Amino acid sequence: MKEERRHFIKQMIAGGVAATALPRMLFGNESHHGYSSDVEIHSQEVAPVRLALIGKGGQGTSDTRTALKVPGVQLVAVCDLYDMRLQAAKNEWGADIEATREYKDILSRNDVDAVIVGTSDHWHQKICIEAMKAGKHVYCEKPVIHKVNEAKDLIKAQELSGRVFQSGSQGMSSIGNRKAKQLVQSGAIGTVNLVEAAFTSGPRQACRIPEGYKQADIWWERYLMNSPKAAFEPSRFFCWRHWKDYGTGIAGDLFVHVLSSLQYIMDSQGPSKVYTTGDIDGVGDTPYIMLGHFDYPAPRNGSNAFKASLTANYADGVSKKWGSLDFTIIGSEGTLKVEWDKVTLKKVRATSAADYAGLAALGSTIDTPEQISNTELLFVEKDYNNCHLDHISRFFDAIRKQTKVEADVRFAVQTAVPAIMCFESFLSGKPVYWDSVNLKMKK
């Protein structure tokens, strides 16, 4: 079986697919849909990875639950500034884990190999740098920085430490994104000119403050860190994404998902120009409606320059669009509707499954498209597990195998900065310019 697998991989490489781009499922259980690693076959051979969570909000909790599905991952500690979350951690994951308000307690432990950073955005860069200096591998939720000027120090810290760093934009690891990348680079839709995505009726559109909370259970002064001093206000803690001092607004929360996917698919390092408009209403001081326009220079794969249009509207209760799960890539010869488990190809002219028979295999069923009409094909991976597990599995595989990840620190910065630029453009009412290669703002 191993010899057959090696022969198959060599054939794919000979067909033009780089080794680093091979789907990780090739190295695992062929019956698994989506991502699968060696550890899922030979779990008895897995070296344990001891994990700690810093920031047990909704996303940090979700990341940890997913991480614990990966064989050999052990949770040893949790940090949060809200006592009720610490108690919830013990209730869910065991009374023997350490539960602390102080993240430095976790970083000082010799039995912590990796951390998930799921705090508010304004803490991301500081904790990540300190974690890598302490020898910990880092999985950080997006966006990995809160301000543009934090980018270079974060990259430098990773380079000096040599630790694995991966951002939490899990959608980019989906089999749908990988198929879209393959189709775009094969010329299936001609020259790409526009990417469109919209977010409406988001799950976090309302400010949700837990009933019965007590201010005494929250370490408020620590939470503020270097942000402007402010009297305690529950929405600033529980709904921090709505406040510019702690979050990055709609763009940092939502746009960054699509930016990660499109920059991965297009092999782009980021836009050169961003212009954004929006409106503020309700809780916080960031927009609840935002329209962002992005100019992308020609990417590294030889394609032409293209545009992206991303919108979010928390006041739209009908459309129910969710851009990171459903965005459109438009080209001169057709369009791709990209979802996590499927891609719909619509062509200007007639097409058939036979036209794509020569593409390298990525999954189980997604490589054999269904004919919807004479100009439309559906590529779908049936019974796909989920891209969140794919993405986090890649992080732990990189730790064990000492390999690189695609959503590394530079990729994370190059997708975070455009989201931050959205808010800067909104405030100024003017376009913002960016040199994504040299990580510099331009005038």
Image (cartoon, rainbow, N blue to C red):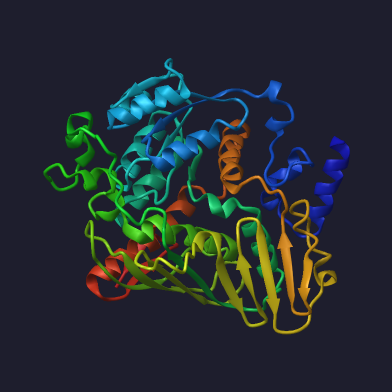
Foreground residue among 284 and 390: 284
User: Residue 340: x percent and y percent?
Assistant: 61, 56
**Could you tell me how many numbered marks the image carries?**
0
In this view, the residue in front, 79 or 91, is 91
Q: If the image is split into quadrants, where does the C terminus sit? A: bottom left
The percent position of residue 377, horizontal first and vertical second, equals 74, 71
- Residue 277 in sight from this viewpoint: yes
Does 2 sit left or right of 242 as displayed? Answer: right
Residue extending furthest toward the top: 96
Left or right: 146 as drawn, with respect to 305: left
State which quadrant residue 212 falls in. Answer: top left
Image coordinates of residue 144 in percent, x first then y, are 39, 48
Q: Which quadrant of the figure contains the N terminus?
A: top right
Q: Which of 315 and 145 is in front in this view?
A: 315
Instruction: Name the image quarter holding residue 309.
Output: bottom left
Residue at 34% across / 67% down in the picture? 315
296 lies above or below 339: below
Q: Can residue 107 be seen in this view?
A: no
**Which residue occupies 34% across, 46% down?**
153
Instruction: Name above or below for residue 358 compared with residue 226.
Output: below
Answer with left or right where residue 30 lies relative to residue 208: right
In this rendering, is residue 285 above or below 308? above
